Image: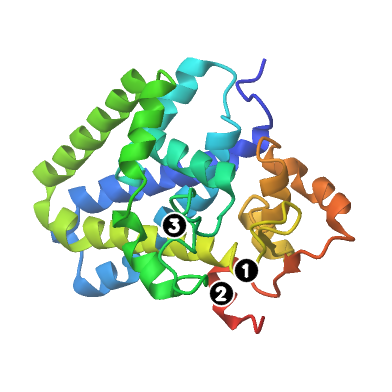
Amino acid sequence: MTIWKYSRRDLFPLLVTAAQMSVNIWLAANWNERSLLQLFLLWPVSLLLFWYNPIVATHNFLHTPWFKHELMNRLYAAINSINLGLPQTLYRFHHLNHHRYENDRKGENGLTKDHSSTYAFGKQGEHEDVIAYSGLGLFRRGTSEAYREARRKGQRMQLCFELMACILGLAGHLFVSWRYVVFFFLPTFYFGWFLAHLENYYEHFGASPENRMANSVSYYGRIYNSLFCNEGYHQEHHLRPQLHWTGRPQACEQLIRTGRIVSKFPPLLGFLDSR
């Protein structure tokens, strides 16, 4: 008997989020014993784990919850909210809004329907500057709409459960070491979400929002997709968001003759692409 709803390979992103939480707890508990050099070397590791969580682990979990039993899914969502620093349910409905409106351009009212669209704060119909998009994305509109959508979908109790987990997690870290929270966790939180927004930016930069077959950017590097659960198959994901990540390479076949963009670099290095 298995606990997995889709594939036991979901154990890998699950272990990454478990590692993230373990590192956070360990650092908070041993903050005073770590030298500046150790903290300097550990911060990129912590940042990598944080960045991996929203773009891979949580992203895939939102579309294809890993466990057969709903109680396990709800419990994991609450625990992982501590890692994310915000309720996972809010992220879920914010992200589903992105899939509904596909990084759309501004309408006649001067607004985009996709709250995370790269065009939302751009000028003259162009993408917003990547640094502004990534640096300010955490603080922009969409949170209140995600909250209202969660309530409409009957997720108020789960949202409260996750919010309480976030509060208790932060309180626990503050109790153990407020210096860890101020000088390590908060910078990791901000720059982790900065990288997550940067990833999303280049997964759509230069694509055609009006064309369902070419509204995203894919990257087919073998190493990246092996480690990042086929995140590079982004156009494939937008076409079939409920397809488990293990099936995305097969979905690539229907896109061979379309005019979509294929990047030579993984999304985080999208600025190196000359397109």
Q: Which residue is mark 1?
A: 266
- State the mark number for residue 51: 3
Query: How many marks are shown on the rendered structure?
Result: 3
Q: Quadrant of residue 164?
A: top left
Above or below, 273 against 58 in this view is below
Between 141 and 273, the one lying in front of the other is: 141
Label 1 secondary element: loop
Q: Is residue 103 left or right of residue 82?
A: right
Marks 3 and 1, the one that precedes in the sequence:
3
Say if residue 215 shows up in the picture: yes
The amino acid type of the residue labelled 3 equals Trp
* Residue occupying the point 43% across, 54% down: 109
- State the mark number for residue 92: none
Q: Residues within 10 Å of mark 2 (few under 14, many from 20)?
A: few
Say if residue 44 shows up in the picture: no
Q: Which residue is mark 2?
A: 269
Whole-percent x and y of residue 212? 72, 51
The amino acid type of the residue labelled 1 equals Pro
* Residue occupying the point 84% across, 55% down: 255
Whether the residues at callouts 1 and 2 have beta carbons within 8 Å, the answer is yes
The amino acid type of the residue labelled 2 equals Leu
Between the C-alphas of marks 3 and 1, the distance is 14 Å
Between the C-alphas of marks 1 and 2, the distance is 6 Å
